[in-house]
Image (tube, rainbow, N blue to C red):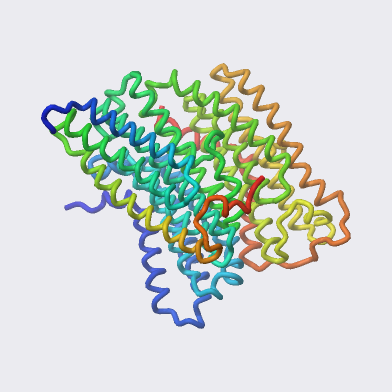
């Protein structure tokens, strides 16, 4: 028997091995040395991230249930990079708050299990694998959201997340059962050949779309987002807003562009409506937020609305721009959440008003925050501008001029509330500013990587060409 | 297959079950009842898969296998939700929805 095919599952196998190794380490490392697990986990995951960049062959395994190709491989690397930065940023929080309660290792185990679920979800070749990956990626995050068991808000966030996501996956399953009824198979390859635009198929697709829209927090399904982000620990909130959202966008894109392509005349109307609603509601609600985490929650809803512009194009250009935008979004949003994390850990302050006069006391942190917000808003020199610009190009090239106009109006609205934070940091004076503090090495490294990403990604154009080349697979 | 009953009757029942679950999720005021409503939705899809497999595509077992996995995952989901509810109950001595509204707007 030839086992070399299993090398195509390299990401999954290595991550599973790391998770199991951490469980063993939890048992054998004595109580007074438990803190070293943080170093171990970051080291192992860093190695995993580097090994992940090695090239991989294009294969289908297990009768087509698991498939991988260049673009999927590249996207797994983006997720790896995001989780690695997230681990660096949350190391200090874990050591200060969580290891004293003797439950630090579980954080890594749950986080890695969830990442494993995302790997399986984005390389799934049939609906069963997709469903199992979706659940494996959601359930550990709900446990993580309720992680600070002494904090009432954290438990509330956990219960809200698990109930909403269970409802979403239930609705999604009902849709999948309808798609199964019309096509007689749960394999994507078979469905592509049979699927036709009947009423039952369209209903199934809309129910299925609702389930995934829940994970991306598109507008009619966004109610859990702000509450969960506010209550959950900041690392978990940033995981939800960056990694979880990115993976869900990617699999939704693959499914819409390949399996559900014959229904494009239906889903383009659906996405048009949802995109307009998402952008407007995300932006308008972000205007009135006082808490930094809720503010970032609504800003991430609005960003998801912009991503839909690439989705509606439905071409190779659309695929490439979505992947490129998600890559930039990972860096920008992780930088913003990292600064919020650092300040919250040091002082416990999370409101926008508390950031007044931050530039006088902590110039480095406020510069990182400014770059992150500029990138999220899309101001030219930084990477976020190019991401948005390409997305708008993709939508415009298919003739959606009105939608692009609405998106540009929304960029203007978003500029206002991102600049509110920048103004509070740089122009306002405060009687009681956040005192100067020095970050530990891991947090500094985490913020440094994000800053490099924000500054370099927009200007290094071969990267975009590379992504565009890879994206040819799905069209 | 059940003699005398066509697929239409069973699919009607599962659709009704699905919408009862959806209605219950929106209107119930108790976290445990909400969990039960979600179980109704999941069970509606399980029955759907089994029935569609049995009536329309009896030569393959994809739907039946899918339903087994759904049952297992639903059990895991319920276990996790109940454990979070118990954690919440230790802090506020209540499982009512109106008690978990400290975060709003």
Query: In the drawing, does residue A334 fall left or right of residue B55?
Result: right
Quarter of the image that includes the C terminus of chain A = top left
> In the picture, residue A171 is in which quadrant?
top left
> In the picture, residue A357 is in which quadrant?
bottom right
Can residue B35 be seen?
Answer: yes
Q: Is A404 situated above or below A345?
A: above
- Check the image and name the residue furthest to the left: B3
Can residue A455 be seen?
Answer: no
Nearer to me, B72 or B89: B89
Across the whole image, how many numbered discs are drawn on residues? Answer: 0
Query: In the drawing, does residue A422 fall left or right of residue A233?
Result: right
Image position, residue A215 (x, y; %): 49, 42
> In the picture, residue A391 is in which quadrant?
top right
Residue at the (64%, 67%) spot, across then down: A441
Nearer to me, A160 or A353: A160
Residue at the (36%, 66%) spot, across then down: A20
Image position, residue A124 (x, y; %): 34, 42
Residue at the (54%, 52%) spot, across then down: A239
Image position, residue A335 (x, y; %): 65, 52
Query: In the drawing, does residue A426 fall left or right of residue A350?
Result: right
Image position, residue A58 (x, y; %): 33, 41
Q: Is A127 situated above or below A332?
A: above
Residue at the (31%, 23%) spot, across then down: A195
Nearer to me, A410 or A66: A410
């Amino acid at each position: 028997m030839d086992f070399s095919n299993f090398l195509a599952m390299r990401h999954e196998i290595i991550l599973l091995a790391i998770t199991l190794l951490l469980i063993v380490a939890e048992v054998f490392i004595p109580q007074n040395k438990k803190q070293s697990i943080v170093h171990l986990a970051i080291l192992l995951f860093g190695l995993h991230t580097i090994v992940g960049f090695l090239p991989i062959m294009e294969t289908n395994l297990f009768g087509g249930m698991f498939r991988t190709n260049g673009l999927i491989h590249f996207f797994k690397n983006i997720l790896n990079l995001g989780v690695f930065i997230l681990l660096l940023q949350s190391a200090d929080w874990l050591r200060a708050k969580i290891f004293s309660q003797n439950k630090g290792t579980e954080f890594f185990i749950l986080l890695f299990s969830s990442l494993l679920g995302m790997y399986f979800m984005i390389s799934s070749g049939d609906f069963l694998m997709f469903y199992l990956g979706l659940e494996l990626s959601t359930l550990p995050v709900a446990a993580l959201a309720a992680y600070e068991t002494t904090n009432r808000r954290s438990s509330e966030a956990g219960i809200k997340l698990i109930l909403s996501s269970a409802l979403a996956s239930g609705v999604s399953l009902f849709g999948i059962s309808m798609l199964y009824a019309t096509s007689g198979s749960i394999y994507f390859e078979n469905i592509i050949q049979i699927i036709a635009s009947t009423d039952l198929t369209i209903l199934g697709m809309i129910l299925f779309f609702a389930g995934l829209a829940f994970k991306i927090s598109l507008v009619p399904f966004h109610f859990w987002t702000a509450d969960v982000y506010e209550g959950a620990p900041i690392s978990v909130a940033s995981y939800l807003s960056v990694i979880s959202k990115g993976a869900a966008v990617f699999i939704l894109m693959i499914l819409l562009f390949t399996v559900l392509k014959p229904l494009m005349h239906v889903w383009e109307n659906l996405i048009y409506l949802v995109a307009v609603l998402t952008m407007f509601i995300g932006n308008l609600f972000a205007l009135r937020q006082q808490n930094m985490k809720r503010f970032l929650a609504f800003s991430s809803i609005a960003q998801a609305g912009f991503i839909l512009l690439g989705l509606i194009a439905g071409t190779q250009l659309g695929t490439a721009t979505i992947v490129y935008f998600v890559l930039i979004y990972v860096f920008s949003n992780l930088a913003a959440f990292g600064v919020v994390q650092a300040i919250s850990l040091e002082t416990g302050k999370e409101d926008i008003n508390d950031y007044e006069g931050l530039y006088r006391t902590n110039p480095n942190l406020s510069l990182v925050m400014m770059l992150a917000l500029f990138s999220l808003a899309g101001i030219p020199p930084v990477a976020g501008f190019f991401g948005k610009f390409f997305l708008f190009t993709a939508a415009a090239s298919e003739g959606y001029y009105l939608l692009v106009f609405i998106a540009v109006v929304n960029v203007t609205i978003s500029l206002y509330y991102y600049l509110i934070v920048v103004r509070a940091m740089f122009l306002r004076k405060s009687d009681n500013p956040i005192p100067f503090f020095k970050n530990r090495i891991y947090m500094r490294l985490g913020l440094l990587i994000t800053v490099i990403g924000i500054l370099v990604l927009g200007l290094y154009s071969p990267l975009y060409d590379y992504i565009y080349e890879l994206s040819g697979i799905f069209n | 297959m059940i003699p005398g009953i066509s697929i239409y009757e069973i699919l009607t029942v599962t659709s009704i079950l699905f919408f009862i679950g959806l209605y219950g999720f929106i209107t119930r005021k108790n976290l445990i009842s909400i969990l039960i409503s979600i179980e109704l939705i999941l069970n509606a899809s399980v029955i759907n898969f089994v029935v569609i497999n049995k009536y329309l595509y009896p030569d393959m077992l994809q739907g039946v296998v899918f339903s087994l996995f759904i049952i297992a995952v639903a059990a895991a989901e319920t276990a996790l939700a109940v454990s979070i509810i118990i954690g919440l109950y230790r802090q506020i001595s209540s499982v009512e929805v109106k008690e978990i509204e400290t975060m709003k707007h």
